[in-house]
Amino acid sequence: MPEKPQHEVTAAEDPALAFQTHDHRHCVGTMLARAEAVCADKGLRLTPVRRRVLEILLETHKALGAYEVLDRLAADGFGHQPPVAYRALDFLVTHGLAHRIQRLNAFAACMHTTDDSDAGHEAVFLICRDCNALAEAPGLRLRAALEAAAAGADFAVEGAAIEAIGLCARCRAAAGEGNDNAGVGA
Amino acid sequence: MPEKPQHEVTAAEDPALAFQTHDHRHCVGTMLARAEAVCADKGLRLTPVRRRVLEILLETHKALGAYEVLDRLAADGFGHQPPVAYRALDFLVTHGLAHRIQRLNAFAACMHTTDDSDAGHEAVFLICRDCNALAEAPGLRLRAALEAAAAGADFAVEGAAIEAIGLCARCRAAAGEGNDNAGVGA
DNA sequence: CTTGAACTGTTATACCGTAACATATACTTC
DNA sequence: GAAGTATATGTTACGGTATAACAGTTCAAG
């Protein structure tokens, strides 16, 4: 599936790649290596289940439901019950290796290389409503704007979920090309 | 509970009020009147169930689960089954009279008076993790920053959920004041 | 090798949400 | 005002999401 290695670049470095054909093995390798480094650093155990869950999430730039992850775990000989998946997912989310996408009740691998703070790094999730691909854009400016908005209510922000729904470039092109179907509009 | 009518001001005009003691009847009255105006304007029917659901949401500056709303509806002689609540909630959300808070799988009354576009107005939700109160801050700047971040991935934003978790001023004060215990509560 | 902590696995259950269908109410149109 | 249509309400039944509680296993350290 992964073709056209346009560059030795991952979706971590260029969020737009998440919506394009790219050498996805490179994303996987980079992110898995980073996960190992992070765990080694902090004395965390990237056990077989956890590692496998991360691999499953990394297989696609989409968000997966916990039960979808569970099915794949079960197929690989791990447990068949929900807590098996939820616990591994919680571990990954807690340590910033994955994210929960509230809007979809689903999970996605983290696509940042810059492991600033633990899970505290802010990100914006861009969800294409057509192809369901998901990109993680840097949210520094967003965070600043959010702090400003919160200050008006004397509220101390500790964490935020910023999730946008819309259309990626590829799906916009596909929609515009030759027909006028399915509302491009808001 | 509503006391100290500090001003004739609603939480719609000053989000910080959501976290403070204020004349809440004023919020309720204003928002209910606005809902009636909006519905009259657009030929929508603010039926008894829908109106009651809005009242229930307006009773508190917190987000309520659909089943919590349902329980109160049932107690008032309306239907006891989930769709009764979900349909009324969907109506309110669709027409911008209420919001769904993804993070909590819950719903809250809209606290904007400026009914710009239908449900399209952008807002930031500030959720106090201690007292669970919820405020709705204007998100114009946020939206701009979001568009900018999305542009980097050539992504067209159609809608966004921006939800921050943190501590309101009151709970921060309570936490700092002499002890480190939890829950000053409602 | 024993002890305690962390991890994996299971059963059972609770919460969130919707599809499909039946009934009732309101809005036309004649 | 009767007939017909659209909208709203109510029900049963079910599926997806998530967690509590407990049992067994593996790991790390003394």
Image (cartoon, coloured by chain):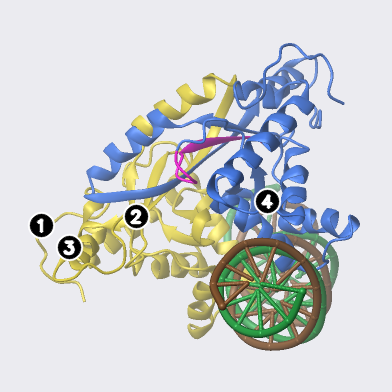
Chain colours: A yellow, B blue, C brown, D green
**Numbered label attached to residue B138:** none
- Please tell me which residue is depicted at 40% across the width and 32% down the height of the picture: B142
Q: Nearer the viewer, mark 1 or mark 4?
A: 4
SS at badge 3: helix
Mark 1 or 3, nearer chain start: 1
Three-letter amino acid code at the position of disc 3:
Ala
Mark 1 or 2, nearer chain start: 1
- Picture quadrant where residue D19 is located: bottom right
Estimate the x, y position of residue A157 in percent, counting from the top left.
Answer: 55, 29
Three-letter amino acid code at the position of disc 2:
Gly
Q: Say whether residue B121 is magenta.
A: yes
Identify the chain of the residue marked 1, using the numbered disc in the image. A
- Compared across the picture, whether A69 is left or right of B83 comes to left
Identify the chain of the residue marked 3, using the numbered disc in the image. A
- Please tell me which residue is depicted at 83% across the width and 56% down the height of the picture: B73
Q: Residues within 10 Å of mark 1 (few under 14, many from 20)?
A: few
Q: Which residue is mark 1?
A: A7
Q: Say whether residue A69 is magenta.
A: no
Q: In the displayed image of the protein, which residue is found farthest to the top? A: B6
Q: Nearer the viewer, mark 1 or mark 3?
A: 3
SS at badge 4: loop
Stretch in magenta:
B117-128
Q: Is residue B174 above or below residue B38?
A: above
Q: Which residue is mark 2?
A: A166
**For the residues bearing labels 1 and 4, Cβ distance under 8 angstroms:** no
**In-front residue for pair A41/A151:** A151
Mark 3 vs mark 4, CA separation in Å: 40 Å
Q: Nearer the viewer, mark 1 or mark 2?
A: 2
Estimate the x, y position of residue A94 in percent, counting from the top left.
Answer: 54, 49
Q: Which residue is mark 4?
A: B46
Q: Which residue is mark 3?
A: A173
Callouts 2 and 4 in the same chain: no
